[in-house]
Amino acid sequence: MSNVPSDLKYTKTHEWLRTLPDGTVEVGITDHAQHALGDLVFVEVPEAGRTLAAGEPFAVVESVKAASDVYSPIAGEVIAGNPALAAEPEAINSDAYGKGWLMRLRPAAAAAPQLLAPKDYEKLVVEEGS
Amino acid sequence: MAFIPHTREDVESMLAAIGVERIERLFDEIPASLRLAGLAGVPEAMNEMEVGRLMTERARLDGRPLCFIGAGAYEHHIPAAVWAIATRGEFYSAYTPYQAEASQGTLQLLYEYQTMMASLTGMEVSNASLYDGASAVGEACLMAVRANRRSRSRRILVPTTVHPHYRATARAVAGNQGLVFEELPYCTEEGCIPAGALERYDGQDITALVIQQPNFFGRLEDVDALCDWARARNILVVAVVNPTSLALLTPPGQWGAKGADIAVGDGQPLGVPLSSGGPYFGFMTARMEHVRQLPGRIVGRTLDAAGRPGFTLTLQAREQHIRRAKATSNICTNQGLLVTAAAVYLSLMGPVGLERVAAASHARARELVDALTRVPGVRRLLRGPVFHEAVIGLDRPVAPVLQKMTARGILAGLDLAEHYPELGPALLVCATETKTTADIERYASALAECLREARAA
Amino acid sequence: MSTRLEKPIFEYSVPGRGAEDQWPRDPGPAATDDLPATLRRSTRPLLPEVSELEAVRHFTRLSQLNFSIDTHFYPLGSCTMKYNPKACNSFAMLPEFLARHPLSPESVGQGFLACLYELQEMLKAVTGMQAVALSPMAGAQGEFAGVAMIRAYHRARGDLERNEIIVPEAAHGTNPATATMCGCVVREVPVNAEGDVDLEALKTVVGPKTAGIMLTNPSTLGVFERRIEEVARTVHAAGGLLYYDGANLNAILGKVRPGDMGFDVIHVNLHKTFSTPHGGGGPGAGPVGVSARLAPFLPVPIVGRRGEQYCWLTERDLPQSIGRLSGFMGNAGVLLRAYVYMRLLGREGMARVSEYATLNANYLLAQLTRAGFDAAYPSRRASHELIITLKRQAKELGVTAMDFAKRLLDHGMHAPTTYFPLLVPECLLIEPTETESKAALDAFVAAMAEILAEAAQEPERLTSAPHTMPVRRLDDVRAAKQLDLTWKPTVAHAIPTTA
């Protein structure tokens, strides 16, 4: 059973989003996604300053058997990509919701995201697994 | 003949196991309206003896003239061991090493090849080869677009001193992805890119500059200045090089202060016969920072479950079978067999032997140019240093002279009229270590004769 | 096969040693005194310094670490690993053919050009196409040429909006990658439970933006696309063209032609159907055939005939050509090998190829089913290849298709293609080819049955396989993370000595 923390929002494409106290957000891929990809060997994170539309690919995560785009759950401007992942992509495998974060984003003013609540995401994972 | 081992009994018992009475029934899902009655356009079968005779006759028809054409394909001595190894069934009839544990021979050979090519070009990484030198230039330009994130223009500067077929191929391979190839004119006196030719691009968004060394005319470009100009402006440098020449000339990784970013070329001079143009192989090496943008296969060394070293395909997530529409290229094969030949060739030559090949070839080319320019009506064009190939001018149209030379069993060079009419009657000639003084004298005296005849006519 | 690891050739290297008999005489420093010092190399490259025997022994030993068709059953699906007749190699390597410079005049090469011209004609006959170009150097380059021609065709008609290429979801990865290389957008269509393209879905995808569809038939699922005529009508009616990926031509050679199915453009993998060597991953050759309306766009050069003389047709003859895909004439020597093979087979041999390839595949399917394996498409005939799915075994026994593949190596058989097509879970795509005997197929079935029994009793024998290869299973994660792509003199490379 995969780990779906209750304090986060999710997307159908297996990203998670955490709203930080200052109104910015942190984005990563879910535990389910990292498990499906297998051992990650390379991660490409976005540069600060890039503006993203909702649903735009902003990162690539690569295992030996798959490479996958990661899509921004909401529109906004990139504050930082996670610099530690270049040397330690496996952080996503070991700590998808913590050290494995991919980027921090300043949401665009008009962002009205359509995100999944934890229980809906759990349901999605169960459906996909069948 | 179809190399089918089945006996009648085999077929009967196999059909019984499947549960059909005739082989034909196995095709019953194909709509009857589409079924073919026969293959009128294919001749009757021949046995091996008959085909052998046919091919020997065809080969004899082509003969073996004395060849002084270079222009991207070079006749070098190929040690007998090279193709004795390459045509061993274990290399010849294996496929891409998907099952690494059963393909360690091919994989280790590719790793050794990557090491040799990276070192020869002065770069950090090499792929396991591409189709040929021309298509490698196209792939290198596409790679430059991926690798140069500061540039959005997709504009590639390509001097007209780059092989005309390479330029055409790069356009065909990369043009559909919106790359714009801008041709830089060359100096018709010197046959090189003049230092000032690039200045008008200062301040413009250019993705990459392609530099061929030696260039199509055999001339040596001022690669340090060209490379420095580009690297100072965040323009990636794609070097196109002759691998033999690198035994003598500065490798692309050391051009200028920072070196080129990507080096490509045709590996044919390294143990691959001329063979009417192929199969050859393209090599591609690069600086480590661009490794994930390389197209094609790459072999890496790792450890097995018992902790022993072994080899495997790596960085496969860049490739089409995983990335599909987002792959670095649609390429799936390399030219493994030719790379096998090249690895053996480079091992037999070593650093000293390869330098000898380069120096001996160059010496023969100088001897050739000296002998030809002593012939009345012949002069050297595009003055300045060359490597084993040069342009000579005639005092009359080239084509009829070449025809007369061919009739004498000599392929006297490549007529430049089609691609470089501005040079007047000009001929690109080449000699390698395979030519002797007698060969060169034969060429020079035949040329003198042909020109005399032409003058008299 | 040897299991003794071989050290990197650089570790045999001794400064001052070399295969000197192979080197030209030293012309002395004066020979290169015209090369400017600023352009001279200052350090020698890292190349081995070994004797000829050391090199020969090293590479011969490496060869013994390979499986190959000449030494092992090699049922790699979608790759058509059939016997490569030795004659094809010998006759293509006659000295005159090898020595011929690609820019030789046409008068020097009438023998070579005659072979290529006749090869074009034979390929037209077996594919049902109107014109053929031989220059693409691999299947993927043939695909590229095909899609580039489709684009050029639409553009030439002023139909500039057509930039969508439709591919079935089970397609080879090269199909979508090619579409991207041609600047097109990929639209995927699903495949139904029986392995045919979902026609209703196709009808919703085609439209004024459709440039074309890329299909393999028989498909990558190892079954014939039965409603191909309707697919063709649907795409043509929408203004698109049909591209035939020739990967599976071995299945239908001499039985049905892509041109008759309605395809407008096709590439043929000579290294599959026409038995040119795979060479450890190349060279291949991917000639393209086209219907009349695409002929003006073919890549150059093409071999033509003027009177009694064979000649090159270039950009001047085909001004609308998509251009050159190689420096000269593609993989010319591969073309000669395919030519020899086709002459050996002749008209009758062509159909025998597909008949016996299909017989072998269906026999394997029947026997593997009897041995307890599940066919991916049990209601269908196999084409020249078949797919079994190990989904059930994976669930019940905890072993994967990859474990089966690795264990097969211990039985002296190359593994089938694994995990392709992606659509079928835990699949093995098995292509025996027509040149394998019943005895070889029976041995394969016996090995599979033995592995299946072992999976139930001793699954760790599978999950830790292979056990008899020169190396055990390799750490791909380490290979990708700690990139070691070239040998370095400073790193120790101890290979444990084996008895």
Image (cartoon, coloured by chain):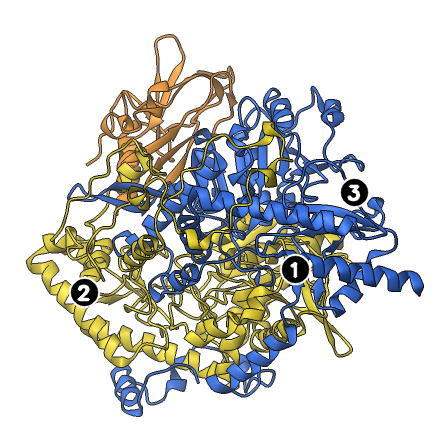
Amino acid at the residue labelled 1: Ala
Q: Which residue is mark 3?
A: B381
| Residue at 55%, 55% in the rendered image | B76
**For discs 1 and 3, the disc positioned in front in the rendered view:** 1
**Residue farthest along the top direction in this orientation:** A22
Q: Quadrant of residue C238?
A: bottom right
Instruction: Output the letter for the chain in yellow.
Output: C
Distance CA(mark 2)–CA(mark 3) = 65 Å
Camera-near label (1 vs 2) is 1
The Cα–Cα distance between marks 1 and 3, rounded to whole angstroms, is: 24 Å
Chain B palette colour: blue
Callout 2 secondary element: loop
The amino acid at mark 2 is: His
- Mark 2 and mark 3 in contact? Answer it, CB < 8 Å: no
At horizontal 48% and vertical 82% (from top left) the residue drawn is: C345
On the image, the x and y values in percent for residue C496 come to 15, 44
The residue at which mark 2 appears reads as C411
Which numbered dot is residue B438?
1
Which comes sooner in the sequence, label 1 or label 3? Answer: 3
